[in-house]
Image (cartoon, grey):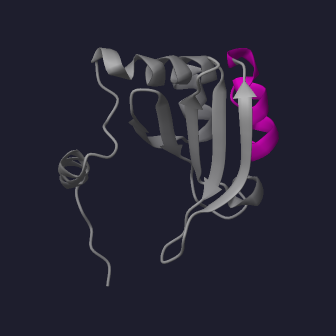
Amino acid sequence: MKIKLSKRQWEYIGDKAGWLSKISESDDQSVAKTILEQLGGNKFIAMTGAKNFMSGSNYLIFSLPGSKGFTKNAINRVMISLNSLDTYDIVFSRIRKNSSPVIIEEVNNVYNDQLQDIFTNITGLNTKL
């Protein structure tokens, strides 16, 4: 049985549960905004089809189109987090209905100028023209 929730309902549930919050104008979202800018901003979104952006004080999570063959290894979820070394840790995973998430690849201690190249190498998606 499928239950469809509106975007507003998901945000309400997420807020009450204390997990992820939408990227907003508050100061604690500056890391997520910076990560998105370093990936290429709106051009990155247009080129990859990235959507459902969620963030916390030191991370950004987004979904990629889930069609088979769209990305290498059917990766459809990416989490990029800022670590204590002021570099990024990236987790590429696949999430399917009725099954546990599968981590496809994890890359640690990535510098900001390496984000786009690593993303392209692992997913097969170009981040720029």
Q: Does the magenta-highlighted stretch encompass residue 123?
A: yes
Is residue 59 left or right of 86 when viewed as pictured? left
- Against 125, residue 69 (above or below) is below
Is residue 23 left or right of 109 when viewed as pictured? left
Residue sitting at x 68%, y 64%? 68
Considering every residue shown, the one lying at the far bottom of the view is 1
Question: Where in the figure is residue 102, as x and y percent of width and height?
Answer: 64, 63
Q: Quadrant of residue 80?
A: top right
Q: Nearer the viewer, residue 35 or 18?
A: 18
**Residue 126 visible in the shown view:** no
- Against 113, residue 90 (above or below) is below
Q: Nearer the viewer, residue 96 or 51?
A: 96
Q: Nearer the viewer, residue 58 or 78?
A: 58
Residue sitting at x 46%, y 25%? 32
Write the start and end of the magenta stretch as one range.
112-129
Number of numbered markers: 0
Is residue 9 left or right of 56 when viewed as pictured? left
Name the image quarter holding the C terminus.
top right
Residue sitting at x 37%, y 22%? 29
Residue sitting at x 29%, y 24%? 24
Question: Where in the figure is residue 118, as x and y percent of width and height?
Answer: 77, 32
Q: Does the magenta-highlighted stretch encompass residue 52?
A: no
- Against 67, residue 16 (above or below) is above
**Residue 43 visible in the shown view:** yes
Question: Where in the figure is residue 116, as x and y percent of width and height?
Answer: 72, 26
Considering every residue shown, the one lying at the far right of the view is 121
